[in-house]
Amino acid sequence: MNPLARYGIDHLSPSSLNLWRASPGLWSARYLAGFKDESAATWRGHAVEAAFSIFFSELQKFALPRRQVATLVIPFHRITSSYNR
């Protein structure tokens, strides 16, 4: 049995291996203990997504034609639905 399978790791990506090389402790915390470190870029991305969500939900309250709202909202949902929350 693959010893990493016990921790739910089915493969090692290049970025994972680079992290191990740079910081075995951080790699262990992230991949073995499940610790998620969130960088400033992650926080900024969440903030931008939240702002767009508010914008589009408020936009639907205006008297815009339904088709016009859909042309704005559908691409946003298509892009953001692939993100893990």
Image: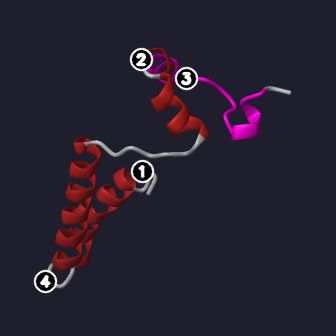
Task: Look at mark 3 in the image and give the residue it sits on.
Answer: 13
Amino acid on which disc 2 is placed = Ala
**In front of the other: 77 or 67:** 77
Task: Check disc 1 and give the amino acid type.
Answer: Tyr
Q: Secondary structure at mark 4?
A: loop
Q: Quadrant of the C terminus?
A: bottom left
Which label sits on residue 22? 2
Find the distance from the CA under tag 4 to the CA under tag 1.
28 Å
Q: Earlier in the sequence, mark 4 or mark 1?
A: 4
Could you give the CA–CA distance between mark 2 and mark 4, rounded to whole angstroms? 52 Å
In percent of width and height, residue 43 lies at: 25, 51
Q: Which mark is residue 62?
A: 4
| Vertical position of residue 59 compared to residue 8: above or below | below
Query: Callout 2: helix, strand or loop?
Result: helix
Of circles 2 and 1, which is in front?
A: 2
| Residue type, numbered disc 3 | Ser
Label located before the other in sequence (3 or 1) = 3
